[in-house]
Image (cartoon, coloured by chain):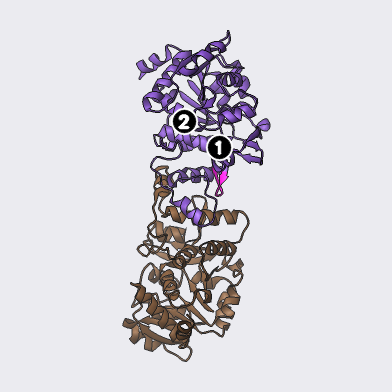
Chain colours: A brown, B purple
Amino acid sequence: MIVVLTGGTGGAKFVDGLQRVVPPEDLTIIVNTGDDHEWWGLYVSPDIDSITYVLAGVLSSERGWGVRGDTFHCLETMKQLGEPAWFSVGDRDLAVHLLRSKLLAEGITPSEATRIIANRLGLRSRILPMTNQRVETRIETSKGEISFEEYFVQCRHQDPVIAVRFAGADEAKPAPGVIEAIESAKAVLIAPSNPITSIGPILAIPGIHDALRESSAPVVAVSPIIGKAAISGPAAALMQAQGFESSIAGVAAAYQDFLDVLIVDDSDSESAKALKSERMDACSTNILMRTPEDKTRIARTTLRAIAPRIVEEFQEAG
Amino acid sequence: MIVVLTGGTGGAKFVDGLQRVVPPEDLTIIVNTGDDHEWWGLYVSPDIDSITYVLAGVLSSERGWGVRGDTFHCLETMKQLGEPAWFSVGDRDLAVHLLRSKLLAEGITPSEATRIIANRLGLRSRILPMTNQRVETRIETSKGEISFEEYFVQCRHQDPVIAVRFAGADEAKPAPGVIEAIESAKAVLIAPSNPITSIGPILAIPGIHDALRESSAPVVAVSPIIGKAAISGPAAALMQAQGFESSIAGVAAAYQDFLDVLIVDDSDSESAKALKSERMDACSTNILMRTPEDKTRIARTTLRAIAPRIVEEFQEAG
């Protein structure tokens, strides 16, 4: 079993590559739920949705979120009705929010709701929310503390960040299957997601960090940083706010307790040499995912870096 | 103040005519909520919506319900997700259900939610749900008891009806403003709605029937029946199930305690003569509402039948 830790648009792209290489039933994806929020009275789980959509083949690759070719007529009407409209919900996307909200209102857990939605879409990979408890990524900015979506979408991550915290994480438990998946994994992959607000919340759930450290499976991460800048989004500013350098060294530091291999961009190959130690290897490739071919190549490179035979095994089995 | 009792598609058409004749601020519309139901976890109030949409100028005249030119992408996705899809909710329509559900979940009453939505759409007429309590029109069919929407939409009113009841009506109270509107009305108009399942639930709320009987305002109804058949929908079968003849005599009987004038179709003018009594007048016109001109004409005829000067007053004021 290949286990992936993911969140955000980079994570969805990475999973898109993986599903082209790994048989779906061999893929377990542990997903950040720190961005979950209430919207128009519905419960929205953006990172779970992105992974669900990418595995169902309906993720909008143009936008990186939501459903391909979706319309926004409900959103337009909500705006006309004077309701907030800064968080873009498409009409098809809305169906998933409605269904999840209905299931949760019936007392079904987030992991069970995720499984039901994935099943109905015919997915064969396993998508696990990091926890069934409510954990909220809160961003302390110079103007006050706001939710991740308020910071990322409403304020377009323009506000200077002072700190990040994961409200509720201390009391949360890993969702059923999360620890077991890490413990029994053949390999654990960390997507090129934001280390602070996509992977950070997952690591903040008591037990997950330890399971990664203690797992016998190799752990490989793909850097979301090239040079000093994030490939996309506010990772650089958030890393700095949390005391990490915005560089591949910062990424390695964020994952130092359990990381075996860091995949970096070719342009960082010199800095990568300095990172290599007895405990951690680094290897470089072109990590920009622009085309389906890029995604497949990066998935293969990542798997080969820790389990050289695994890609061939999958190919032979497929 | 002109007060209208209404429900269903015939009611919305009638109100469309009235708004072309009566200044909006002089119109109070008391609406059936017996068809309200939960759908995809949202609270849906079909008759309130139709009146809201017709007054906002966005009702689909083609369908008679929902928003003109709406799309059904969320519905299609819900169907793909294995959720029920027999009740058609458009993407723009959905915004109103979301907003109402959110307001109700916040503890706001149905009448206040109705007012908020109407205000946001810039409406100047007053829309009053018949009650703020949950009253459900239940249809006893040969296959068991079902909700009105299950009977009307899901089963396309094909099941033989044994009886109709309004669950919760005995304990319900008229919504704020309903009794006051009837008491102070210049005229009370009963739309050509289904007497059993559109007007029946309104009359079943304790206090409303008495207020109509005691009001000094003339009460006029437009027949939803021509000959022995309903202009549309299952009114004939439902009237028979409740012991009324499916004819203008049946309509007159349903409203006999308070009706002053019944407007019937020209083709029923002979039967209308037999209906006339000291207590009730009947007058005939072409009551089919096919065009905006039909609707305006019927609104004028209805008002003139009870208050001959009123239409001219409105025209002079406008």
Q: Nearer the viewer, residue B277 or A125?
A: B277
Name of the residue lying farthest toward the left: A267
Q: Nearer the viewer, residue B274 or B260?
A: B274
**Residue B110 — which label?**
1
Looking at the rendering, the stretch of residues picked out in magenta corresponds to: B38-43
Residue name at image x 42 percent, y 40 percent? B67
Relative side of A257 to A161, left or right? right
Q: For marks 2 and 1, give the CA distance.
A: 19 Å
Check whether the beta carbons of the residues at disc 2 and disc 1 lie within 8 A of each other.
no
- Mark 2, secondary structure of its residue: helix
Residue B144 placement: quadrant = top right
Pinpoint residue B294: horizontal percent, then vertical percent.
39, 24
Tag in front: 2 or 1: 2
In this view of the protein, can residue B165 be seen by the observer? no
* Count of marks, rendered view: 2
- Mark 1, secondary structure of its residue: helix
Pinpoint residue A52: horizontal percent, then vertical percent.
48, 65
Pinpoint residue A282: horizontal percent, then vertical percent.
41, 86
The chain holding disc 1 is: B
B135 shown above or below A124: above
The chain holding disc 2 is: B
Amino acid found under the numbered disc labelled 1: Pro
Name of the residue lying farthest toward the top: B278
* Residue B40 lies in the magenta-colored region: yes
- Is tag 2's residue or tag 1's residue first in the polypeptide sequence? 2
A67 shown above or below B149: below
Residue ID for mark 2: B12
Residue name at image x 31 percent, y 82 percent? A267
